[in-house]
C-alpha cells in the first residue's frame, strides 16, 4: 500500500507515530512560517504541516493534486472539533506528488459552484464531493443490508438474463440486434418478471435479485432509461405473507441504516386512498384529507358547484391568516395546465368565529359553518374547495394538498411515513386503445371474490396487488400472480391478445403453468428511489454513480454515439435517417 | 404461508406435530393398503402416507403435481438414512391439489433421461433437478461471501451503467439503437473498465461490483454472450497489494464454501509458465513439466529434430506399459488439426533399465539414456517428445500434457490448485492487422524497468499484469493501470489509434487523468467460471439459471426474435436482409 493509514483514521493516541498518507489536496494555507495542507480521501481529512524550509515542496501544490506525505503524528495546538481527525496533524518529512491536477472547473466542496451540466460532464470530479460520496456509500450499505436480510430468510439471489425477447405489452423495450441470428433482436428486460415466475415453477420458492432494468420511455424528470430494482418472488404464500416479509425487510433497513424503529406499517385500500387523498400513493406525513361536501353545497345558486359531480374540501390548520397574495398564488397553482382546475374556492374560519369565503354571496354564514363542521375545521383554519368530475377534482385536490404540504413544511424528508396500499383494480380502461390495460401487469391475479365480475364488469375486478408507498412516493409494487394456465389465457384475451399473440410472446410461461406451477407472488422495489428517500432527497440522479440526462445521454462519455458502417453491416441493419 | 414447514425440516423430535407441507410429487408408490408419496421442494423430500381409504385422494396424483398436505408427523418403521427427514413420515389427513402437471418430457432426477436440447427448452423443469439447484445455491453462497468479505475490507459496490459507448478496440460490442438520439447507438459493456478507473479518479479507492458483461463473439463451446464478473479496483496500491487482497478473498471463499484451507497461492512468471508448461494458465495439479532436449538430439541424422527450433520432452511417470494402441491413439491426438503436430516420438524407459524409442535407428541406448536423465525419468516411465518451432511445439506439448493428465486421472476436480501468473507481456503482435494489440487491455501499465524498450522493442516490454489461474483455467486477470495522460496517449499511439480516435473514444478518461488521477489497479474474476470450478465442473452452463445455446439463443423463450416494423421505424433502423 502506498499509505499506512487513511485520512479519516488518525486520533490523539496515534501521536508520535510515523505515518504515510495519500490523498487529494483539498486546501492549502501558506502562513509564511508554516504551510497547512488539508489532505482528503473518502475517509476524511487530515491536516499536514510543512515548515518554512519546506516551501519548495508546497509552493507548486495545487487543489486536487494527488500526493503521498510521510511524517509524524503530532497533537494540534488548536484542535478542530468538526472533524474526527481534528486533534492531530502530520509534521511532514517527505512528500511525493503522485499526480498533478489542472484547476477543476468547479469547486470540490459540499456546495459546489458548478452548474448541473458542467458537473455532469465532469462527473468524476463531482463524485469527489461529500454529498455524492455519502449517497453512494448509503446505496452500498442498503444493498448489503438487503442481501444480508433476505439471505437470512433463505432467499436465493439468482441472476436472470439481460438479453431476452421484446414484448409489445407495457413500455417500450430497448432492443439489441443479433449478429448471429440475422434480422432478429434481443430486448433488454423491463423487469425479470417472467423469469422470476419461472423460477417459482422451478421450485426456488424464495428468489431475489438486485437487478438493472431498462425502459425506453420519453424521460420525465427524474426517470432514467436504466434503473435498479430489488426484485423478489415467493411461492406458497398469500398476499399477507409477502406484505409481512417485505415490511420486515424495510423495518430492518430503517433500523440498520437510519436508526429508526418501526413496529408495523399502516395499510390503506386503494379505494380509501383515492377517496381520502385523491391518489394511490398518499403522503401520510400530514393530514388535510378530503371532505366531500357535494350535498351541502348544491342548490344554492352557485352554478359551478351545482354542475359539479363532486365538491371536495380540505382543511389547512391555522392558515386563516393567509394573505390575499398567498391565496392568489394558490389559485394560480391550481389553474396551471398540469393541475387543470378552473379556480379555487376558499373558506376562512376566522379566529373570532366568523367565516369568510370567496363565495359569500351564495352561502350564508350558517351554511359555511356546516362546511367547516364537515371538515372538522376550527377557528383559525382555512378550507380550500375544488369541484368538477370526481376523478379530475380528486387529482387536482391531491396536487393542491401536496403543494400546501410543501409550503407549510409538512413534508420533512427526515420523517418517514411508509404505507401499504392494497386492493388495486385489476384493469384500467384505456380510451386511446379502446381496451383494458393491466393496471399492474398481465400476470397479476384477480381477487377470487371478484372473479364473477370478470366477464360482466371487468373494470370493477380488484387484484391481489399492493404497493409500498413512502412519503408519497411509490417505492415498490407487487401482486399474487396467476398460476393457472386457463386464467392466464383469459387475462390475455381481456387485454386484447389473440391466442396466437399470447402463445408467441408468452407461450413459454403458459406452457410452464401446465407442469406444476405453485401459487406465488412477489414484489419489486425501486432501488434508486429507495436510496434517494433514505438519503432524504427527492431526485434519484445523485444516488446513481453515472446517470443519464433527460435526453438519455451520458454527457461525460458522450453516449449514445454513431457507430461504424462495418458494425451496422455485420448486424444487418441500416440507419434510415 | 401455505405450509408450516419445508420438506427438509422435520425430524424425529417433531413427531406428533400437526404440520402442513407443500411441494411437488416426486414419486408415488401404491402398495394397496397404503400409498406413499415423496413430496419434494428445494429443501428436501418428506414421505407422505395415505391409507387405503384415502385412495381417491391419491389415485389421480401424478408426477410433479403441486400439492398441499396436512397431517401428523409419525416415526417411520423402516427409516431412510439417506435423507435428513428419513426418520419420519406424515400421516396425511387432508390433501389439496394446488396445481396439476402434465407428464414432464424428461425425468426430474439427478440423472435425467432428457437430452441437452430438450432440457434447455424446458429449462424451468431442468432447474428442478438437484444438481442444478445445488449449482445455483452455490452461486448464491459465493456471491454472498464475496460481498461480505469485500465489504469487510471497506470496498464499496458501485453500479456502473449498462448503456455505454461502443469502442472498436477489443471484442465486438452488442449495440442498442437509441430512439431519443436518432441514428445513434449505445453499447453494452464488455466490462466496466473505464468506469471503475473513473471511480478511482473520483477517490472511491476500493470498488467492486458483481456485474453482467456482454461480448458479441462467435461462441466457442462454453462461452456465453452475457457473463458475470466480480469486478474490482483499488487506488494507492502496488501489484503486490492487489494480489494479496484477492488471494485473501479466494482463501475466504475456499474456506467458507468448500471447507478447504489455503495458506498462500504459488506464483509463476509468464516466461516460466510458457517455458515449463507451454501455456499461460498451467494446471499445476500434476507435473510433467517440459524438458528442452534440443541440444541433445541434434546432429544424429534424424532430420525432423535437426530441422526443429525446439525439441520438447515430457515424462509420464510409470507409463512404460502403455500399449501400442495407446501410443497410436496419442499420436492421433497430437495430429488432430486442433493440436497440429506432425507426429509423436516416445521413449520407453523399461523396467529392466533398457530403453525403447520410436527413433531407435537414429539414437543409441547411451543417447536415449541422456534424454531420460534430462527428463528425470526412472525405469518404468514413458517420455513423449514433440519438436518444431518453439511456440508451436510448446502449444502442442501443452495440449498433450493436459490430455495425458485427463487420461491418467491427474486432474481431479475436487483438488484445487490456484496459481498466480505475473509479468505478462504488455503487447502482442497481430499478424492480421500488422500492429501490436494490448495483451490485457490498453489501460495496463508497462513495468517501469522495461519502459526504455517501449520505443525500440515494444514486444519485449512486460506489463504490471497478472492472472489468477485455477486448475488450468484462467479465472481472473488484472493489472496496475496507467494513470498518467502522456503514458496513456503513448499507449494509444502504439496500438494504432490516431490522436483523434483516441480522443473520440477515450477522451473522457484522458481528460480525467489531468485532474488528479491516483495510482490504481484492479482485477476481474469470471464469476460463472469460478462457480463451475467450485462446483467441481468444467462447463459454466449449468451454473447459469437461463443460459443461451451456442448460437446465442434462449430456446426456452425463443429469443432473439423479429420485432415489429413499428419498433424499427421508431428506432430509425431497417433490417437489410
Image (spheres, coloured by chain):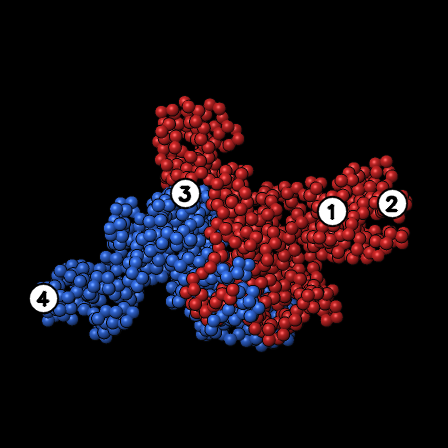
Chain colours: A red, B blue
Which chain is disc 2 placed on? A
Name the residue located 89 percent from the left edge and 46 percent from the top edge. A361
Position of residue A184 measured from the top left corner of the image (x, y, whole percent): 49, 70
Q: Is residue B406 above or below residue A261?
A: below
Secondary structure category for the residue under label 4? loop
Quadrant of the rendered image containing residue A3: top left
Badge 1 vs badge 4, beta-carbon distance below 8 Å:
no
Residue identifier under label 4 = B300
Which quadrant holds the N terminus of chain A?
top left
Secondary structure category for the residue under label 1? helix
Residue identifier under label 2 = A360
Position of residue B417 measured from the top left corner of the image (x, y, whole percent): 33, 56
Q: Residues within 10 Å of mark 4 (few under 14, many from 20)?
A: some
**Cα distance between the residues tagged 3 and 4:** 63 Å
Position of residue A88 measured from the top left corner of the image (x, y, whole percent): 45, 28
Q: Nearer the viewer, residue B19 or B98?
A: B98
Amino acid at each position: 500500500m502506498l499509505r499506512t493509514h487513511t485520512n479519516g483514521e488518525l486520533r490523539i493516541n496515534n501521536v508520535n507515530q510515523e505515518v504515510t498518507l495519500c490523498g487529494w489536496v483539498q486546501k492549502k494555507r501558506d502562513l509564511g512560517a508554516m504551510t497547512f495542507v488539508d489532505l482528503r480521501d473518502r475517509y476524511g481529512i487530515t491536516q499536514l504541516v510543512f515548515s518554512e524550509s519546506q516551501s519548495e515542496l508546497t509552493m507548486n501544490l495545487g487543489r486536487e493534486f494527488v500526493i503521498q506525505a510521510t511524517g509524524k503524528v503530532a497533537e494540534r495546538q488548536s484542535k478542530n472539533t468538526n472533524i474526527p481527525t481534528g486533534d492531530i496533524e502530520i509534521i511532514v518529512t517527505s512528500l511525493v506528488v503522485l499526480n498533478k491536477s489542472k484547476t477543476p472547473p468547479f469547486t470540490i466542496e459540499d456546495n459546489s459552484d458548478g452548474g448541473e451540466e458542467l458537473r455532469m460532464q465532469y462527473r468524476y470530479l463531482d463524485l469527489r464531493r461529500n454529498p455524492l460520496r455519502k449517497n453512494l456509500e448509503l446505496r452500498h450499505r442498503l444493498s448489503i443490508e438487503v442481501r444480508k436480510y433476505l439471505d437470512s430468510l433463505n432467499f436465493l439471489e439468482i441472476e436472470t438474463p439481460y438479453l431476452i425477447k421484446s414484448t409489445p405489452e407495457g413500455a417500450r423495450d430497448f432492443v439489441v440486434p443479433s449478429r448471429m441470428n440475422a434480422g432478429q433482436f434481443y430486448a433488454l428486460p423491463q423487469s425479470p418478471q417472467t423469469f422470476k415466475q419461472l423460477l417459482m415453477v422451478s421450485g426456488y420458492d424464495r428468489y431475489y435479485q438486485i437487478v438493472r432494468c431498462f425502459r425506453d420511455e420519453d424521460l420525465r424528470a427524474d426517470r432514467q432509461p436504466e434503473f435498479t430494482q430489488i426484485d423478489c418472488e415467493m411461492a406458497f404464500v398469500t398476499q399477507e405473507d409477502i406484505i409481512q416479509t417485505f415490511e420486515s425487510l424495510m423495518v430492518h433497513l430503517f433500523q440498520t441504516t437510519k436508526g429508526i424503529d418501526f413496529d408495523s406499517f399502516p395499510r390503506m385500500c386503494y379505494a380509501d386512498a383515492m377517496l381520502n387523498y385523491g391518489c394511490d400513493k398518499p403522503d401520510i406525513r400530514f393530514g388535510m384529507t378530503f371532505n366531500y361536501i357535494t350535498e351541502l353545497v348544491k342548490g344554492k345558486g352557485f352554478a359551478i358547484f351545482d354542475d359539479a359531480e363532486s365538491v371536495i374540501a380540505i382543511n389547512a390548520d391555522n392558515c386563516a391568516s393567509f394573505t390575499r397574495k398567498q391565496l392568489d398564488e394558490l389559485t394560480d397553482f391550481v389553474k396551471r395546465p398540469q393541475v387543470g382546475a378552473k379556480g379555487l374556492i376558499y373558506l376562512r374560519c376566522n379566529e373570532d368565529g366568523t367565516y369568510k369565503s370567496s363565495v359569500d354571496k351564495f352561502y350564508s354564514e350558517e351554511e359555511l359553518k356546516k362546511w367547516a363542521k364537515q371538515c372538522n375545521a376550527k377557528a383559525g383554519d382555512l378550507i380550500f374547495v375544488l369541484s368538477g368530475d370526481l376523478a379530475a377534482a380528486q387529482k387536482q385536490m391531491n396536487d393542491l394538498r401536496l403543494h400546501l404540504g410543501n409550503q407549510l413544511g409538512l413534508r420533512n424528508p427526515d420523517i418517514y411515513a411508509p404505507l401499504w396500499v392494497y386492493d388495486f383494480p385489476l384493469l384500467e380502461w384505456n380510451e386511446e386503445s379502446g381496451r383494458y390495460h393491466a393496471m399492474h401487469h398481465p400476470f397479476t391475479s384477480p381477487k377470487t371474490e371478484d372473479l364473477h365480475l370478470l366477464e360482466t364488469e371487468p373494470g370493477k375486478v380488484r387484484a391481489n396487488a399492493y404497493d409500498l408507498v413512502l412519503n408519497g412516493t411509490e417505492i415498490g409494487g407487487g401482486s399474487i400472480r396467476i398460476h393457472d394456465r386457463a386464467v392466464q389465457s383469459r387475462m390475455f384475451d381481456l387485454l386484447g391478445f389473440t391466442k396466437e399473440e399470447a402463445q408467441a410472446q408468452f407461450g413459454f410461461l403458459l406452457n410452464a403453468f401446465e407442469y406444476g406451477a405453485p401459487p406465488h407472488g412477489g414484489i419489486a422495489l425501486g432501488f434508486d428511489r429507495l436510496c434517494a428517500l433514505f438519503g432524504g432527497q427527492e431526485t434519484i440522479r445523485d444516488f446513481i454513480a453515472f446517470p443519464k440526462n433527460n435526453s438519455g445521454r451520458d454527457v461525460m462519455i458522450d453516449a449514445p454515439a454513431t457507430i461504424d458502417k462495418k458494425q451496422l453491416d455485420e448486424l444487418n441493419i441500416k440507419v434510415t435517417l
